[in-house]
Amino acid sequence: MAGATPMSRALLLTVNVHGVGPEAASQPEADLFGRDAHGKYTYRIGLERLLDALRAFGLPATLFWPSGEAQRMPALFERCLRDGHEVASHGRAFEDHATLGAAEDAVIEEAHHELTRLAGSGAPRVPFADGNLVGAHDPDIATPRLPLRFQFPRRRRTLFARWGWRAGNDRAAGLGSPDRRHSFPPPRHPGPGGGADERGARALLAVDGYACLTFHPRADIGIGRAARLPMLKRLSDLAAGHGALPMRGAALAERMLTVILPN
Amino acid sequence: MLERHAVKATFFCCGYDAEHWPEPFREIHRAGHEIAAHGYQHEGFDLGEREPELLAKTHHILTEVVGEAPVGWCSPSGRKTRLTLPTLRSLGYRYDASEKDEDLPYLLDDRFAIVPNNTVSLDDFPLYFSGGALASEVERNFVEEFDAILGGDGYVHLTIHPKAGGGSGTPARAAAVDRFLAYAKATPGVRFMTCREIADHCLASPGAWREPRR
């Protein structure tokens, strides 16, 4: 979106719905609870609090749901739809798509159909997307039979607005550590030029006219804690100051497909 | 510092430490702080069938050293097993302060409370030890958390360690805690409580605290 005019500026607010989170793909779920505060915190309060904040700030978002998390939180999944957010697909249970091989089609289809089922026939049409497929993956290989319309180039243009985010530090320090109990980065408070997220957003908006902010409802490396939610408003206000208003992923994709690409 | 601020705290103590160096624990207890259990040697992993034995051992050591049985426990790693809570209940415990799944305390039933802690951002250990934060950053974070929580749930659970490496034992870090306590004390309507007092407060009104958000 280089050379974007003010009218085409956009802020994409996305939420990766981590309940137990991707850590459970590599270690027993029971070992995670009670340690990093991420699992049950999202289920008990984290996601509800984030949805409350999006509602209070009047911000539409795209929520990437793993179908397994949607099954665990049906009431919050329904509320997400009721609140007018976009539900998008985030796989089944945090699979690493780069390693799925021939099974990838089935995983994507299963997640898609389960999210469709949970959304119900009376629900708004759900333009599913997939936030897992990045980098070397070719979406045309994986999703030919499903009406998937977009994927996000997360690694290149996404800001991960995570607590403690620092340049070069994706998600959290020490994810691979044998004992992840205390593997948190320190808090980073905005300096005179703003925090890393603010500086990054400002730079992206100035150059590309587009920023994608990704939030997580968890307590440890997400925005679930009460003290962190103001970040949501601060960054969306910053984007608005650059002429970038929040859009849902599907709407942005449609704009690209129908307006930008044909030209 | 706690005496100067007239604040009573809960000290989660390891049985091994109290067994070998009992006097500091007696002093803490005499000063009016709560002594609660924190494993025998800060065990963080699955102990298998030995777990009840070690829970009971620490319980009896702390009881003997300070002359009062602990009623609260905090898992050193946050982990529990199927044996943990039944053993604690059989020993007369009234609360578990290991969970990190909520910001508010809540009840498992009419006889047992969960007093969640916030290891993520209201605990000095990970911030200093893993995060390499400065004392000024930690202090500012504590204040930011305090202010935000005060505007919402109104319940702040701060965990401090007295050690030098992953704690607030060094002068600059202790001074940060000191300033935070002064800030909190100066805030109208704020009351300091021990974990036992919080648990008993909830247990006295079970209808309100089984599901505090419902």
Image (cartoon, rainbow, N blue to C red):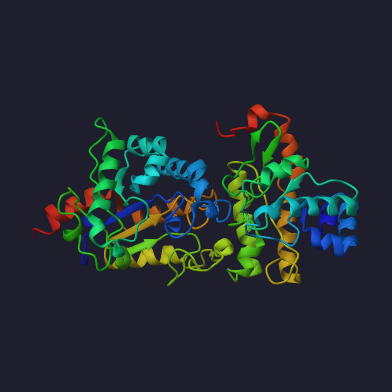
Residue B51: percent from left, percent from top: 70, 53
* Res A60 → quadrant: top left
Q: Is residue A169 left or right of residue A144?
A: right
Residue A40: percent from left, percent from top: 52, 46
Residue B195: percent from left, percent from top: 74, 45
Q: Is residue A155 left or right of residue B148?
A: left
Whether residue A212 is visible to the viewer of this picture, yes or no, is yes
Which quarter of the rendered picture does the N terminus of chain A lie within? bottom left
Residue B97: percent from left, percent from top: 68, 48
* Res B153 → quadrant: top right
List the single residue furthest toward the front: B49
List the single residue furthest toward the top: B207
Q: Nearer the viewer, residue A193 or B214?
A: B214
Q: Residue at x 63, y 69 (%)?
A: B129
Which quarter of the rendered picture does the C terminus of chain A lie within? bottom left
Q: Is residue A259 left or right of residue B7?
A: left
Q: Residue at x 22, y 56 (%)?
A: A8
Q: So how many labels did they put on this image?
A: 0
Whether residue B94 is visible to the viewer of this picture, yes or no, is no
* Res B190 → quadrant: top right
